[in-house]
Image (tube, helix red, strand yellow):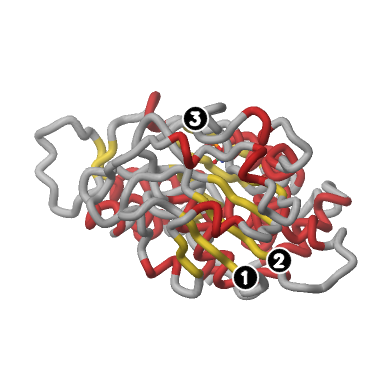
Amino acid sequence: MKQFISVNDVRKIDTLVLSALAYKTNPLSDKSLGLNKRIGCLFLNPSMRTRLSTQIAAQNLGMECIIFNVGQEGWALEFEEEAIMSGNTVEHVKDAAPILGKYFDILAIRTFPSLKNREDDYSELYIKQFIKYAGIPVVSLESATLHPLQSLTDIITITEELNKWESSRKPKIVLTWAPHVKPLPQCVANSFAQWVNAWGRSDFVITHPEDYELSEEFTKGATIIHNQEEALKNADFVYVKNRSTYNDYGKSYTNDAKWQLKNKRWAVTNNAKVMHCLPVRRNVELSDEILDGEMSIVTQQASNRVWAAQAVLAEILRTPLP
Ligand code: CP
C-alpha cells in the first residue's frame, strides 16, 4: 500500500480487517517492523481518537510518532498553485511538504472541509498537495470528504460482531442522519457508505430527511429511504451520524428531534447494535438511553481505531518504496 486516502487504496478489505483483528489479539507481534522509522502526524484540525490511536499503533510497530498541530502551532499553509501570498498564508505546501518528506517515512494528515465551496472541498486539494510534494506515503487522518481509518474501524467492529453470530446471513446495516446544532462535514457518512458498498457483505440502507442526499459517488449500491422508522425495520447495525447537506452545500436545514434515536424507535430493529464515530452530542444526536444501553458498541468501535491504524501502517511499512 503506497498511500491510504480512501477504500480505493486497499487491495482486499477482508485482509486488512484480519490483520487488524490479529493485532488486537497480539498488539506487539510486529514490534520491530517500524524500527528506526518515523511517522509525522499533522493536524490542521482537532482530534482525540485519531491522534491517540495512530500514535499507539505506530508505537506498537516500533515507530517513532511525532505529532504537529499545524492548525495551532504551525505557519499558515497555502495550497493553491501560483498563489500570490499577500494574505494570511505564510508558507506554501510545495515548500513545506518536501521537508516533511525528508523528516519522516510516513506522513499522516487531518484536514477538514470549509463547507463553503463544494468544488473546492471535493477536489481534496490539501491532501493531494501533500501527496504531490511530500514524496513519501501519505495517510489520511480524515480529509475534506472522507475518513478512511474510521471506516476501516467500522468494518472491523461489524466483523467482530458478525463473528459472534451463529448464522451466516447478510446483516442489515442502516446509516441514519441525526440532528445536530451546527453543520458538520459529510466525511464520515461518505466514507462509511463507500466502504460498506465496497465490502459488499450487507443489505445497506441509508436514511435521512429529504434534501440530505449524499454524493452518489459514495452511496451507489445502497437503498435510500426517507422514513427513518421504515429504514430501521430489522436492522442489525445502526450507524448514527449527523452531516450537512451535499446538494445545497454545507447547510443544516433542520434540527428535527424526531430523528434522534430513542428506545421506542429501536423496537423495530433486530436488536441492533448502535455505532457512532464520536464525539457525539448527547441528547441532540443520540439519546442517553441508546448510548448507555446494551445496544451501544461505540466504545468497542473507538478502541478498534488502534488496530485499524496499526494494520494500515504495517501494510505501508511492508510495501517497498519505488
Ligand atoms: N472519530 C474521530 O475521528 O474522532 P476524533 O475526531 O477525536 O479523532
Q: Residue at x 49, y 74 (%)?
A: 221
Residue position marked by numbered label 1 in the rendering:
203
Relative to 133, 7 lies left or right: right
Q: Secondary structure at mark 1?
A: strand
Identify the mark nearer the N-term, 3 or 2. 2
Q: Position of residue 136 (x, y in %)?
A: 48, 58
Image quadrant assignment for residue 169: bottom right
Badge 3 marks a residue whose secondary structure is: loop
Q: Is residue 121 left or right of residue 45?
A: left
Q: Which residue is mark 2?
A: 171
Task: Check disc 3: other Cα within 10 Å, few if <14, some if 14-19, many if 20+.
Answer: some
Mark 1 and mark 3 lie on one chain; the one further toward the N terminus is 1
- For the residues marked 3 and 2, what is the alpha-carbon distance in whole angstroms? 27 Å
For mark 3, what is the residue? 284
Circles 1, 3 touching at the beta carbon (< 8 Å): no
Return the x and y of residue 305 as percentages of the image width and height. 67, 45
Q: Which of 131/14 is in front?
A: 14
Give yes or no for contact between labels 3 and 2 (Cβ–Cβ under 8 Å). Answer: no
- At 45% from the left and 36% from the top, the residue drawn is 43
Residue 240 image offset from top left, x and y in percent: 55, 46
